[in-house]
Image (spheres, rainbow, N blue to C red):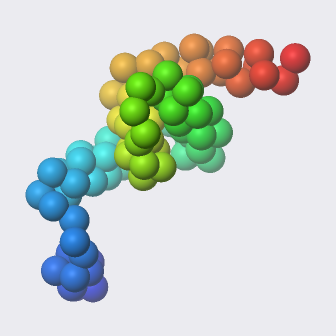
Amino acid sequence: MPEDKEFDKLSPVGSKEKSVKSSLEKLISDTKLNRYQLIPLVLRWTKELEKHSEKKISPDELVNQALNDILSDKVKLEEITKLIEGKRR
């Protein structure tokens, strides 16, 4: 992936962001979850994080946090599924 290295050189991303990106990439590649089922879960958990945050968080950070919470089992999938089902009622 030579173009990825070129992008990294041009990208203004700091080392912390690169570390978060690489850890998320590892979690995503190692997950047993269906990626298509993961998308609505991440979107719903992102909304929940935003709602309960005391400060303004960028959308990128919210998605990264939601992915990290879900893929590292900090939040149970059943909890998010209940939030989704509760909204449908």
* Observer able to see residue 37: no
Instruction: In this rendered view, identify the residue nearer to me: 34 or 23.
Output: 23
Q: Residue at x 55, y 27 (%)?
A: 51
Q: Residue at x 44, y 19 (%)?
A: 75
In the image, farthest residue toward the right: 89
**Which quarter of the image is occupied by the C terminus?**
top right
Instruction: In this rendered view, identify the residue nearer to me: 46 or 82.
Output: 46
24 relative to 79 in the view: left or right? left
Q: Residue at x 15, y 51 (%)?
A: 16
Instruction: In this rendered view, identify the residue nearer to me: 9 or 56.
Output: 56
* Observer able to see residue 8: yes
**Which quarter of the image is occupied by the N terminus?**
bottom left
Task: Point out residue 53 in the picture as x, y percentages from the top left corner.
Answer: 44, 27
Q: Residue at x 57, y 14 (%)?
A: 79
3 relative to 61 in the view: left or right? left
Quadrant of the rendered image containing residue 37? top right
Task: Point out residue 10 in the picture as x, y percentages from the top left corner.
Answer: 22, 82
- Location of residue 56 with respect to 29 vertically, above or below: above
Quadrant of the rendered image containing residue 15? bottom left
- Location of residue 5 with respect to 41 vertically, above or below: below
70 relative to 16 in the view: left or right? right
74 relative to 11 in the view: left or right? right
Task: Point out residue 39 in the picture as x, y percentages from the top left corner.
Answer: 59, 44
- Location of residue 79 with respect to 43 vertically, above or below: above
In the image, farthest residue toward the front: 55
Quadrant of the rendered image containing residue 57? top left
Task: Point out residue 76 in the picture as x, y percentages from the top left corner.
Answer: 48, 16
